[in-house]
Every structure is written in structure tokens, then in C-alpha cells.
Image (tube, rainbow, N blue to C red):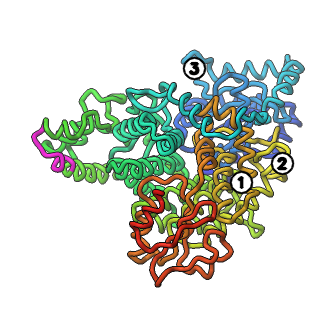
Amino acid sequence: MNRLAKATSPYLRQHANDPVDWYPWGEEAFRKAQEEDKPILLSIGYAACHWCHVMQHESFQDPETARLMNTLFVNVKVDREERPDVDAIYMQAVQQLTGRGGWPLTVFLTPEGVPFYGGTYFPATPRYGMPAFRQVLVAVAEAYRHRRQEIEVNARQLIPRLQGSIPPSPARDGLTPRLLEDAYLRITREYDPVHGGFGKAPKFPPAMTLEFLMRVYHRFEWEPARQMVERTLQKMARGGIYDQVGGGFHRYSVDAYWLVPHFEKMLYDNALLSRAYLHAYQLTGFPLYRRIAEETLDYVLREMTAPHGGFYASQDADSEGEEGRFYVWTPEEVRAVLGEEQGDLLCRYYGITEAGNFEGRNVLHIPTDPDVLAEQVGLSLEALEAQVAEGRARLYEARAKRVWPARDEKVLVNWNGLMIAAMAEAALVLGREDDLRAAQAAAGFILEAMRRADGRLFHVYAGGEASVPGYLDDYAHLIAGLLALHRADGDLRWLREAGALAEVMLDRFWDDDLGGFYDTEPEHEPLLVRPRTLTDNATPAGNSMAVDGLLRLAVYFDRPDYRERAERVLTDLSRPMKRHPLAFPHLLCALDFALATPQEVALLGDPRQADTQAMLAVLTHPFRPHLILARSASPEEADDLSLLRGRRPLDGRATAYVCRQFVCQAPTTDPDELARQLAS
């Protein structure tokens, strides 16, 4: 047992029995490095990371490698999900040093924490064009002893490049729809017209880019934008990146056609993708998109929801020491569960062959259009789908008896904010009560168990305690979740909590000189630099989420100062957004909202009554990305909110007020009239 045995992070505890003398991130490790004049070996990963497990097995659990590490370095382990600030700084450093990044992240630091060499996964023996990890250890230690001055000079020169700032670069014409057009045209150059998605292998699910394209289609009615969205969503839904048996999406595809994934499942992917499919359903009415959204959220409810209400972080890629072992099948295994006839049918449906498509086994996918297969096997499409649904349920039951992948059961506020928004929106659009209750429970848990008396958030809940001061992402993502929850259930508490968090966010993270937000509070633990993330990555950046939230809260609370702050960020980043749109997809969605004149709707009515539900059906179909919805069943309690002030129901019936810039049309209790007013 090393020092990680007492950690709350499940990832750190995975390394508690390594023979490496691991330290958690903190003063003790840096003090030891300075006292013994040793460099620090910083290893950053996360619990669901497959290659992190490979490097642990090959190197960190190898006695000889551990002996070298313990002799030559002070070794520090970090969970990137628990400490995204540390990860952001040293990931950027490795990208500057090597031109690439990823996890596990391996960085060598001076005792003062300044990086001077790094990489990602290093194999135990030389392969993949990389030296063996032991060779790297020896070479780095020798360089540190014999070329110390050179290393320190070069390392210090790296620090200014880690500030994470992009100089303000406003577009010549200011904030105009032309920025959206130019960004769209650049995105089209990266589109894969055959398999959907953007770029080549490996392919990551581009939820935020698809959201932007749906807004482009909504604004300009450009048919190619919708086609890119639909082709990508359909290819992913039929691919192996989607868990065809249990629902939910894996992290990414190693190929260009969405077949073989890296099998870890992350909460944030499933939050962002379920919303993308839900919005595509609103946009097109195509039932497939609704089914995938529902199955994905069902997976989260079933496998990723804690008894206390929070959502867990991730599920591992590996089980029984093998990547993907839990998810893959042979024809024999399928027939053993379903029998010969139904087994053969599902093997054809899911592309399961004797040869396999993944190390002799099969990642399930749908290679043939179901209507074509139905004709080939002499069944109606309805009969085929019924057989597949019944067989799929039995395969799930059989799979549940296998050794499950490990689950990282820490709760992260930022990722929970994304899932709260997804659950709440599905509840509103599809009438899913289970999703609404889950979103309410998660929001309640975070506000009660992960918030201090002064209103500031913690970032992580693990081992029965909340810890790590909240980051910008936590505030911005939770605000989005609370706004979605208010739209779903009409409870004014969520709206007021979102407003309170916005005040803390502006007070603790905004920098007026820079015109944007830092990732950390001023009193946060001193690091090499104060990180500031501007580009969207696997999740929306805190800055882009904060901009979106402030634009919406500006309407709810009539706060033009919120809009001014948001527009300053958009203006400063307008040229980078135009030139590198795939790095700013969520910020582009916020820009689209900023350039619109939002439809403001105050809806007064009991959410349980049919007349209120009829009005909500109009408001949620079709896709309305520029709609601001304020709701109340008790309007006399809502006079502090601009959209609801002075509004009252007519004749005791659900009543809608449709406004633009607080100038309203006549209130209506008729869903058809509401639709007409929205269309006008």
C-alpha cells in the first residue's frame, strides 16, 4: 500500500497497491523533490482510461520499473477528472513540447513544478516507434543531472506559453450572422460525406458541432447542414460506438466508420449526445432519434445514477483484464441465449460473424438497413423489430451476468450539470417523468451536499464527502442544468438558484482586464499559471457555457450587464471562432443565440393539468433554440422575475404570453393561437 490508499478518488485508489511510491498532488511531494533534488514524474489519467490501465499493468506494477521510478524521481499521481486545473496546465505543456497529447499523460517536472519533458503512453518495451518507459526514465534522469541549467532555462521559457489566453481578436464587422456562415463553411470542409462526422480516424462523437449545424439549419434553412447532422447521427446510432444491447455511447471510435470503439462510457458524452438526438427529433420528427435519446437516458438511469441522486462519472473500458470483454459476442454465445432461429436472425441484424470484427469476437452494429433485412428474411419490418427488441432484452439479461466493467462513482458537478439538462429537456419534450425526477434529485443533491454556506460549490463528491473548490465549469454547467430544469417543471427555485450561481461565478472567475473567465478562483491553490480554457473540447468550455448562461439569464432577470459580459467574450473570440470553428462549437451556438431576438414566453398554469401540457407541446415542437420559457403555477410568487411580473392566468386556464424584448402579444389560452403567435 502506498499513499494513495486513503484517496477519495477511485482512480487514485486503483494505484494504491502499485510498488511505485506514489504521492497525491500536494505540498508533500514538491517538498520531498526539493529536499532530495529530484525531478518529479507526474502521471495523469482517469478511472475509465484503457491505456492508463495498460501502462499500470506493464510499468507501474512491474517491480524493476517501480524501483527505477522510486530511485530517480518523486512520483505523483493525479486524477484528471478530480483536478482538471492540473491536467489542463500539463496537457498544454506536453502539447507544446511534443505536438500531441492524451492520457495517460506522463510529464517530468523540476522540483518547482515546471515541465521539461513529457509524453503520453510509453510501452514497457520499444514499439509503436516509441522508446521503452525504462529507457525514458534513465535518459530523463541523466539529462536532469548533467544538463540541469539547459533544462531549467528551456522549461522557464515554456511558462509564458501556458497562460491559456488568446489575445482579443474581434472580427472586422463585429458580431453578425456572417460569422456563423463563415464558421459553417469551414466546418463543411472537414465533413466525412460517407460515414458522417468530421475528420478521419479516430473519430469522436461531435455532439456540439451537430448542435451548431442544427442552429444553422434553423436560422438559414440550409439543407446540407441538416443532412450532415442526420447522416452523422444515423451512422453513429447504427455503429459499434453505440451500445446496441444496453444503450449509451462509448467514448470514441478507433476507425472512421464508428464500428470499433474505445469502450469506456463517460457521463458527459451521454449527456451531450442524448440532447443532440433529442433536438434532431424535434427538428425532423424521425423516430430513430427519439429512440436513441430515450435508450441513452434509460442507460444512465439504470447504471449511472447513485442512490443519493447524483450521476456517476464513468464506466471502464476493461473487464476481466480485457478491453471490451463485457460488450462483445460470438455467434455461439448469441445462439446459446436465444436459440438457433432467433439467434441467427440477431446475428444477421447485428453483423455478428464467425470471423468477428474485434479480436475474433464481435462489436454489435447494424450493417444492413432494417427494412432491407426484413425483406431478405421474409418478415414485415414491424415483426423484425419486435423480434430484435425481445432478443436484445434477453441478451442484456445474459450480459448482466458477466463481470461488469468497473464504475467510477465520484460525482462531478460540471458533468452532472450536463446530464441534468439532458434529463430535464427529455422530460419536457417527451413527457418522461423518470427523467424529471432524476434531474430534480441530482440538482437537489448538488445544491445540498456540494455547496458551501457562502454559496460556493465544491467540484467532486466521493467517499461520502465533497472536496476540491469548484471550477468555472461547475458553475456554468450547473446553471445550464438548472435553467433546463425550470423549463421542465416550472419550479422557480431552479431559476433563482441559477441566478445566485451566476453572481458567484462573475464574482469569483470573471477578469475585467482579460474580458473573460478563469477556470479557478483567485484563492485557488497556486499553480504554475492560473488556467483559462477558451476552446471547447470533449465538453463545452466553461467560458462558452458561461456566455450561453448569461445571455439567457439576462432575459429572465432583465440584466443587460449580463448580456454585456457575454458579448465581450463573443467579440474577443469572434475571429478565432470564424477561423477554427471546430474548436468553438458551443460558443458558436451561444453566438447564434446572441444574434437572435429571443422569443420570450411566460406560461402560467399547473404543470399537472392537460391544458398546460397542451401549451407545452406547442412550445417544444418543432425545434426552437431561441425560445426563453419562464413558467409558474403561482404567478403572485414570481413578480421578481421580469418575464413573469404582472402576468396572470385567464379564467383559471393555462395562459401563455409571447413577447419579444418584453413587448408582448395578447395572452392566449388556445394552443393553436400560441402556435400562430410563435410563427409570426
Task: Report the span colored magenta.
Answer: 377-385
User: Measuring 51% from the left and 48% from the top, which residue is drawn there?
Assistant: 272
Relative to 216, is 675 on the left or the right?
A: left
The residue wearing badge 1 is 563
User: Residue pushed farthest bottom?
Assistant: 651
Residue 125 marker? 3
Q: Quick check: is 164 in the magenta stretch?
A: no
- Tell me which amino acid carries mark 3: Thr
Contact between marks 2 and 3 (CB within 8 A): the answer is no
Contact between marks 2 and 1 (CB within 8 A): the answer is no
Residue 512 marker? 2
User: Measuring 68% from the left and 40% from the top, which residue is drawn there?
Assistant: 175
Sequence-wise, which precedes: disc 2 or disc 3?
Answer: 3
Residue 636 in percent (x, y) is at 61, 82
Alpha carbon distance from label 2 to label 3: 51 Å
Circle 3 residues within 10 Å: few <14, some 14–19, many ≥20: some
Alpha carbon distance from label 1 to label 3: 55 Å
Q: Main secondary structure of the magenta part?
A: helix
Sequence-wise, which precedes: disc 1 or disc 3?
Answer: 3
User: Measuring 34% from the left and 39% from the top, which residue is drawn there?
Assistant: 238
Sequence-wise, which precedes: disc 2 or disc 1?
Answer: 2
User: Measuring 42% from the left and 54% from the top, which residue is drawn there?
Assistant: 622
Circle 2 residues within 10 Å: few <14, some 14–19, many ≥20: few
Q: In the picture shown, does residue 667 fall above or below 43? A: below
Who is closer to the viewer here, 384 or 244?
A: 384
**Would you say residue 322 is visible in this rendering?**
no
